Image (cartoon, helix red, strand yellow):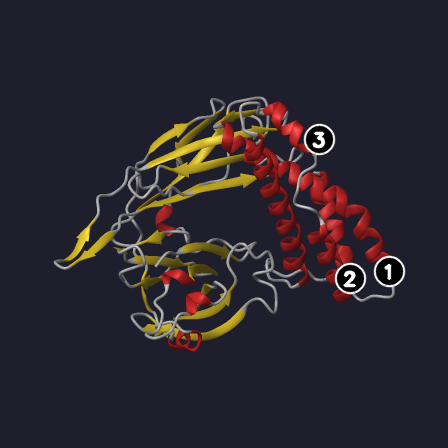
Amino acid sequence: MLLTSCAHQQSKTRSVGPTFAVEFPAENGPYGEVSARQLAIPANGGVGTEIPGNSLRPLPGTNPHAEPPITLALGFTTHGSKVVATAYTIPPDSDPLRWADGHKHLLGSWSARLNESIELKELRKIGYQPISFKIVKFVPPPPAHPALVSKAPSIQIAIASDDNTASDPRAFGGPDTQSCAVVLHNVSSRGVVAYVLSDSGDPKAGIAMSRESRGAPGRPVIASQGDSRKEFFTFGRAGRMTPQGLVRLPAPPQQIIVAAAIFTDGSYEGDENVAAGLQAEQIGTLIVNRLMKPVIDPIIQDQSMNDEARTARVKDEIFHISSQPDRATTRSIQLQFPDLPTKDVVADLTRGLDTAKNDFWGDLYGYMHKCCQYPPPDHISLAEWWRWHNRLSLR
């Protein structure tokens, strides 16, 4: 099974190391690879993971893959001596409303104690064989010592001096995994608006993981001469099931790379293709904010609608924005990245506009449904969200 994870903890609460973990069985996945996985559950929060539908096994005689693709979203929270698990089916990442009501569907909710298992029999209802997982005691992974590489000369990368991944809820792996935390230091006089980190991945499979952190020109993610937040990485190894049994695959090299960074003065360092994608996302955000401001103000002031109707109107306006960049915007990126083909520049800008629209709607939806904040705000209104959004955009 292919798993991705995220963790959340209650704000204004001291982080408490995990006690439990969810152990996913080492089953033969769609690519013939096997890897036992554990997902730590923070003691004062929750953790989630997603499993693509094509990683699940269909029931004999059925073909659920012929239906629109789905993703299985699993959430786990600790309640005293029990772990509560909740499962939803949601559309894939390509659907910007995947977490909206009417798009996500509750499959079920269960609870288990230490060393107890949960079987998702409800998967049969949608054409898949059940999967199971076990609640186990959290065992921290040993520390990793990857090679650290920066393609951006102004960005230094180092293992965090107070690295304590043993108690971090984002620890995600199994007996063959290692984890570490890194920090980036900006040695320049410019703030860092965005950067991309990647690992070396598996050269044989051609798979590498990357992540990005984004801010804004007035709200850099790394200040001049400042440090980034901690970035956590987990390295593991898989196996392949053969007629003779499980064969462990060689562990890929451990490496963390600063692929690119863009700065508050508009300059960039690192891989040109990666930097162009970051710049396109920044431009997409500016365009969406500029186009939405004159639209939202009259919607908020319209007393003939309640906030539910206003929110629906805003959503319609967001996704009516074209994802095709105009010539002037395309030309501005080409001037900064003259070696990139025009089709690549247009593709980057299209992705940037799509990302900006999805982020804009995600912020609004999360605020209005209290699903992205703890504790929830005292007062929920579209006008309050718009004031908060504008304050954030101006910083």
Residue sitting at x 47%, y 67%: 67
Residue 86 seen by the camera: yes
Seen in the picture, residue 27 relative to 281 is either above or below; the reply is below
- Residue marked by disc 2: 310
Residue closest to the eye, 179 or 303: 303
Seen in the picture, residue 124 relative to 394 is either above or below; the reply is below
How far apart in space, not on screen, are marks 3 and 2 (Cα)? 32 Å
Where residue 94 appears, as percent x and y from the top left, is: 54, 54
How far apart in space, not on screen, are marks 2 and 1 (Cα)? 8 Å
Task: Give the label, 3 or 2, closer to the camera.
Answer: 3
Which kind of residue does numbered mark 3 sit on? Answer: Ala
Residue sitting at x 44%, y 71%: 84
Residue closest to the eye, 13 or 348: 348
**Quarter placement of the N terminus:** bottom left
- Residue marked by disc 1: 302
Where residue 121 appears, as percent x and y from the top left, is: 38, 77
Where residue 169 appears, as percent x and y from the top left, is: 41, 54
Dot 2 or dot 1: first in sequence order is 1
**Quarter placement of the C terminus:** top right
Q: Quadrant of residue 384?
A: bottom right
Seen in the picture, residue 204 relative to 42 is either above or below; the reply is above
Locate residue 261 relative to residue 358 in the image: left or right. left
Q: Are marks 2 and 1 in contact (CB under 8 Å)?
A: yes
Residue sitting at x 69%, y 46%: 322
Seen in the picture, residue 54 relative to 323 is either above or below; the reply is below
Dot 3 or dot 2: first in sequence order is 2
The residue tagged with tag 3: helix, strand or loop?
helix
- Residue marked by disc 3: 328
Where residue 209 appears, as percent x and y from the top left, is: 40, 43
Which kind of residue does numbered mark 1 sit on? Answer: Asp
Residue 77 seen by the camera: no
